[in-house]
Image (cartoon, grey):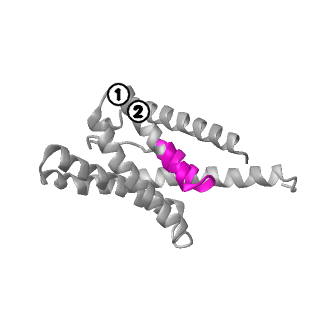
Amino acid sequence: MSKTKRIALCGMLTALALALSLVERMIPLELLVPIPGIKLGLANVVTMFALLFLTPKEAYAILFCRIVLASLFAGSVTQLLFSLFGGMLALTTTWLLLHKHGSWFSFYGISAASAAMHNFGQIVAAMLVMQTVDVIAYLPLLLVSSIPMGVLTGTILNALQKHMKHLRLAKKGTAI
């Protein structure tokens, strides 16, 4: 793929991740699961997709751009800090599990671990912002919520990955 196409793809994936992030804010998930701040993690599917089909550098760039733009739209510096800590830790965990131990874990396990590390990163950010370690008491609730949210994003990613393999075969002219 040419450099121009890669840049365009990164831009489109950033826009998709940003749109999913903004749509996700409109879903009142807290009405179903009474854990403040819980999210589905749909934008993380795009980041993990980028990690599978692009370079780690491009995946980190997509994540960083999405976080900065979402924080600008929301007008929240605190959100920027929380998202950066959580997102970078989650993406690093995903990269390590995919590329160093990829045969050991399914997308479901990798997504759940990524969601758990995202929550851990947010707790670290909260401790820094609030200047107290008391917020760590909230971590067990977040870690429990990371399992179903990780399974959801893992399911979506698994379907996307299978579809992309199918498209690659069709593009090469292989019988489907």
What's under tag 1, amino acid-wise? Ala
Numbered badge on residue 70: 2
Q: Whole-Å distance between the Cαs marked 1 and 2?
A: 6 Å
Please name the predominant secondary structure of the magenta segment in the image: helix
Residue, x 32% and y 27% (percent of image)?
75
- Mark linked to residue 82: none
Front residue of 64/166: it is: 64
Q: Position of residue 152 (x, y in %)?
A: 48, 50
Q: Which mark is residue 74?
A: 1
- Residue stretch rendered in magenta on the structure: 43-62
- Residue 103 showing in the rendered view: yes
Q: Are marks 1 and 2 in contact (CB under 8 Å)?
A: yes
Give yes or no for residue 47 being in the magenta stretch: yes
Percent of width and height locating residue 149: 41, 50
56 inside magenta stretch? yes
Residue positioned 13% across, 47% down in the render: 131
Tag 2's secondary structure?
Answer: helix
Q: Residues within 10 Å of mark 2 (few under 14, many from 20)?
A: many
Give how far across and how far down residue 53 sits, in percent: 63, 53
Three-letter residue code for mark 2: Ala
> Residue 156: in sight, yes or no?
no
Nearer to the camera, 31 or 115: 115
